[in-house]
């Protein structure tokens, strides 16, 4: 099983950048500018490299579906959620993406079936999610509770995107073209939507910190991350690829603590630990290494 890099373009830096921008901008505006700037940069890069975007309607239909599942839905839900919860908690909840992916891939693909180890991992991981959400849900519905549900819904959308995105390999679409196509499709929908719903063009204007966060979000966490994402998706299974989302909360928590003054409750860290155990069970490699080591030591 491959050990790919950043699985979803929502790395720890992404949650940090959104945490900065959400102080001055609405969630739709953040997402529209994120995909819009990324689309401009990717289209310019493609022209400079002498490449061409496809004109096939079938390909563009796939770009729009991928943009919906991988950009429009999760980016918007997570950005709204981060208006009510910390970036570190949002990143931990986003780490549930592989749990959803295991289930989605089982039903929608033929080569990633549920095994006993994966089922156990899913149950352990969702137990961690329930442990984190339980106190807030018991206290009654609030923006904080709904924000956590929104981030989880974004993770589910990422899971469907990971499975759907594998078809670009069979369509013969290079990773950079796929990345450009999906963010361009997303931008054509989200920019008019943000203009209508949030009317962000009037004062007060965002400060330098917000614009810097938006540039980081667009160029590093979207443009560059998606080029890597689709390259890896062409060679790794959807579940394998998305397992690395568990690495994201570590950097998100550090950035949020150091620069945003955020603090997490102990139950959030305990929930993250349970998700980590669940992902280890899904992956299977850590347990296999332990078995091999015991076998070499003659304890099995």
Image (cartoon, rainbow, N blue to C red):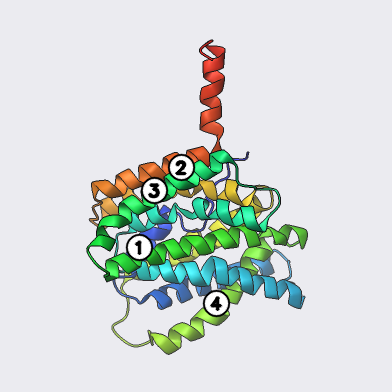
Q: For the residues marked 1 and 4, what is the alpha-carbon distance in whole angstroms?
A: 25 Å
- Contact between labelled residues 1 and 3, with CB atoms less than 8 Å apart: no
Left or right, residue 169 beside residue 189: right
Which of disc 2 and disc 3 is earlier in sequence? 3
- What element does badge 1 sit on? helix
Instruction: State the mark number for residue 127.
Output: 3
Front tag of 4 and 3:
3
- Contact between labelled residues 3 and 4, with CB atoms less than 8 Å apart: no
Q: Residues within 10 Å of mark 4 (few under 14, many from 20)?
A: many
Q: Which residue is mark 2?
A: 278
Q: Is residue 44 visible?
A: no
Please report the residue visible at 49 percent of the width from the left and 41 percent of the height from the top.
120
Q: For the residues marked 3 and 2, what is the alpha-carbon distance in whole angstroms?
A: 9 Å
Which of the 4 image quarters holds residue 63?
bottom right
- Contact between labelled residues 2 and 3, with CB atoms less than 8 Å apart: yes
Residue 24 vs 7, above or below: the answer is below
Instruction: State the mark number for residue 148.
Output: 1
Please report the residue visible at 55 percent of the width from the left and 46 percent of the height from the top.
5
Left or right, residue 58 beside residue 187: right
Residue 124 vs 27, above or below: the answer is above
Front tag of 3 and 2:
3
Q: Residues within 10 Å of mark 3 (few under 14, many from 20)?
A: some
Q: Is residue 166 visible?
A: yes
Left or right, residue 180 beside residue 21: right
Residue 256 appears at what percent x and percent y?
30, 54
């Amino acid at each position: 099983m491959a050990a790919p890099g950043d699985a979803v373009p929502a790395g720890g830096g992404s949650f940090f950048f959104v945490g900065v921008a959400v102080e001055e901008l609405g969630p739709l505006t953040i997402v529209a500018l994120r995909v819009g700037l990324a689309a401009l940069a990717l289209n310019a890069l493609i022209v400079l490299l002498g490449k061409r975007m496809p004109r096939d309607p079938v390909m563009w239909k796939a770009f729009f579906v991928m943009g919906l599942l991988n950009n429009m839905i999760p980016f918007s839900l997570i950005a709204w959620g981060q208006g009510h919860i910390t970036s570190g908690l949002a990143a931990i909840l986003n780490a549930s993406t592989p749990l959803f992916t295991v289930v989605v891939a089982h039903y929608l693909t033929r080569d990633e079936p549920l095994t006993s180890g994966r089922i156990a991992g899913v149950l352990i991981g969702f137990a961690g999610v329930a442990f984190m959400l339980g106190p807030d849900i018991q206290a009654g519905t609030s923006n904080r509770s709904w924000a956590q549900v929104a981030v989880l819904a974004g993770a589910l959308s990422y899971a469907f995107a990971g499975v759907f995105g594998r078809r670009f390999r069979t369509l013969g679409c290079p990773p950079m073209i796929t990345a450009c196509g999906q963010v361009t499709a997303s931008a054509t929908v989200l920019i008019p939507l943000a203009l209508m719903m949030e009317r962000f063009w009037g004062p007060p204007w965002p400060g330098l910190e917000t614009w810097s966060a938006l540039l980081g979000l667009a160029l590093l966490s979207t443009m560059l991350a998606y080029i890597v994402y689709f390259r890896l998706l062409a060679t790794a299974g959807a579940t394998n690829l998305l397992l690395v989302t568990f690495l994201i909360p570590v950097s998100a928590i550090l950035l949020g603590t150091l620069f945003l003054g955020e603090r997490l409750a102990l139950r959030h860290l305990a929930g993250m630990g349970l998700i980590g155990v669940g992902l280890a069970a899904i992956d299977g490699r850590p347990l296999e290494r332990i078995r091999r080591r015991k076998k070499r030591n003659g304890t099995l």
